Image (tube, rainbow, N blue to C red):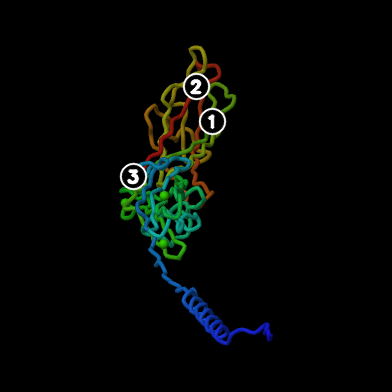
Amino acid sequence: MNIKTGQQSPYLLLGLFFAAVALVALVALLVVTSRADNSTQTATIENSPPIVDNLFIATSSLGAGQENLTLTETSKQIFIHGAATDPNSCQQIDAHTQWDVKFYRTDLGSGCAADPVNCYHITEIASNVTGCDSVSDTNVAYQFTENIFYNADATDPGSNPNNAGTDWTARVCVTDDAGVQTCKVNVKTEILTLNSLDITPSIAFGNLALGATSKDATMTATNKGNYNAQKVKIAQAAVWDCGGDSTMPVAQIRFSPTPAFTYANASSMKTVASTVTGVTILKQTVSGTLRTEKIYTKLQIPNSGAFGECTATLDFTAVL
Ligand SMILES: [Ca+2]
Ligand SMILES: [Ca+2]
Ligand SMILES: [Ca+2]
């Protein structure tokens, strides 16, 4: 008997061959049809400029806007505040370094050099810009403060120097992250004339005999306002109080703009205010350099009928 081992039918082999070919083709087809691909999409969001929505000049934090500013003898704090929007995101305008704020006499323009008399370049700090909460938030609040000095130019009718024809401008500019700047100015603000004076607080004539006339006492009057030709009125409302029943008349004091003046020729003090002729104090225009004038007084003690330590108060009024 002839037994063959390891031999297969040729039909079976052919069948296996075609089956293998079909499997390879199917796998290849699957690979071709399942291969991934992608398409990159691009778009650029155009920058929208920022908008300064509103601008108020106030004399208190977040206070109501006002047209007129009255200064004080020291300095007056102002608050420039409002809201701003960037339609892209508040994050494009929320850094204080992106803000530029000035307060200046309008006729000088925003390019003016910093000067307390007429042009303030306001320092911006981080806390000046608030309220940017997320990338989808578009709005911020701002508030900048500045101290306006007493000698800042008045712009009302009667101002000296005469600046009635102009006023003061607050200008707020913000630049977004794309470098686009938008500015807003207030409509109108006048600084009013400030008529104000500082006077030497006390005078000591020392010990004087009955009938004696003192040496000059010198008083310094300082212009602490913004009017360029300030005059001075002087009065002594009540007689000298020398203790007990002892008094001296108001008219024992005489005054003059000239040192070492002759008592007999000088103006007598009165209970009603009278102008010190010859004293006109200019306005301070250079920072740190006060403008002053001297007023000289002499006291003559009555020949009799008075004794004691005497005191009296002089009243000064600044007048235009
Ligand atoms: Ca923008
Ligand atoms: Ca906001
Ligand atoms: Ca004006």
Residue 166 position in % (x across, y down): 33, 55
Left or right: 12 with respect to 40?
A: right
According to the picture, the residue beneath numbered tag 3 turns out to be 66
**Quarter-of-image position of residue 192:** top left
Q: Amino acid at mark 3?
A: Gln
Give the residue drawn at x 56%, y 28%. Answer: 205
Label 3 Cα neighbours within 10 Å, binned few <14 / some 14-19 / many ≥20: few
Choose the circle earlier in sequence order: 1 or 2.
Answer: 1
Secondary-structure class at tag 1: loop
Residue 124 vertical position relative to residue 38 in the rendered view, above or below:
above
The residue tagged 2 is 302
Q: Are marks 1 and 2 in contact (CB under 8 Å)?
A: no
| Residues at circles 1 and 3 in contact by the CB criterion of under 8 Å | no
Q: Is residue 123 above or below residue 292?
A: below
Residue for point 41% across, 52% down: 137
**Relative height, residue 66 to residue 8 (above, below):** above
